[in-house]
Image (cartoon, coloured by chain):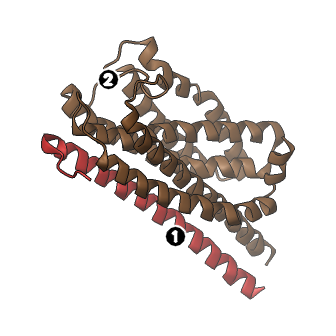
Chain colours: A brown, B red
Amino acid sequence: MNWLFKYANPHNFMRLSNWLLPVCAVGAVLCLAVGLYFSFSAPPDYQQGATVLLLFIHVPADLMAMGAYVIIAVCSLMSVIWRHPLSDTAARAAAPLGAVFTFLGLVTGALWGKPMWGTYWVWDARLTSFLLLLFLYLGYMALWNAIEDETRAARACAILALISVVNIPIIKFSVDWWSTLHQGETIMAGKLAPVYLAPFFLMMAGYAFLFGALWMLRIRTFIVERRARTLMVSA
Amino acid sequence: MNFDLGPYAAYIWPAYAISAVALGGMTAWTVLGWRRAKARLAALEKKE
């Protein structure tokens, strides 16, 4: 854990992100460009036809939405246990990004649902728990903004994140635990046709790199804003 | 590359367009926030 503690220091994080951020940004552009090329070059699915193209943007958005919330919970746990100053900042920085990915997961899912299921929306376990994730993101961000004292806000948000992260396994296993319209596990179960693996993993990498780059930039922004506030107070 | 999406074009193109706008908007918002914060800090440091 020592390596992690080292980068929980704002100065060390600024140095690390100074070179890691451009690497992630370039990775995002390259993976998304090549991923889009492979996506639109892939043959239509034998059952779903051209709508298989939605897989390449819907599933990465869903996975990033859930991954960002897990990141928030892990940072919150670090904040509660070790009280690293950067943990709260990292958790707070990830929230709006996760909310955008959740929104995209819901919208692209609805646009996939209509031609495949005949409806944009159904109140089944997967869709409802995923909608709840969007509300959790909005609630988390609202709580940060509602409490003026930053230390108290961070503590309240950490507790909220640690309790509500239970929704992530519920989303993941909802298709196994309940009878849902949403299809079951496909990619990890090895059910995805090999021809779609390259575009899927490229788009997934592109989304992950983009999240990484923007997350680091938002943490850097918070650190710089904090420095500016300190200067203003001391002036 | 195949851009003829047949009867599903009405669902696929909006999904890609919304994704592009949301991800592009999120990127622009983040970069602008960073630039604003950096400019503010630079102005304060200049005053010091």
Image spot of residue A220 (x, y percent)? 67, 63
Looking at the picture, tell me which residue is in the foreground, A55 or A78: A55
Task: Choose top left, top right, bottom left or bottom right for residue A33.
Answer: bottom left
User: Which residue is nearer to you in this view: A52 or A120?
Assistant: A52
Number of marks: 2
Measure the alpha-carbon separation of dots 1 and 2: 38 Å
**Residue kind at label 1, given as amino acid type:** Leu
Task: Mark 1: give few (<14), some (14-19) or many (20+) Cα within 10 Å.
Answer: few
Q: Which mark is residue B16?
A: none
What is the quadrant of the C terminus of chain B in the image? bottom right
Q: Specify few, some or many for label 2: CA neighbours under 10 Å numbering under 14, 14-19, or 20 or more.
A: few
Residue B43 percent location from the top left of the image: 67, 83
Q: Which residue is mark 1?
A: B32
Determine the secondary structure under disc 2. Answer: loop
Q: Is residue A199 visible?
A: yes
Residue sitting at 43 percent across and 42 percent down? Answer: A198
Image: A57 above or below B24 = above
Instruction: Answer above or below: position of A65 versus A94.
Output: above
| Residue A122 image point, x, y percent | 28, 25
Disc 2 residue type (three-letter): Trp
Q: Nearer the viewer, residue A8 or A19?
A: A19
Instruction: Write the residue at 48% across / 54% down.
Output: A31
Q: To which residue does mark 2 refer? A: A123
Q: Residue at x 36, y 49 (%)?
A: A38
Q: Mark 1–mark 2 contact, CB under 8 Å?
A: no
Residue A81, quarter of picture: top right
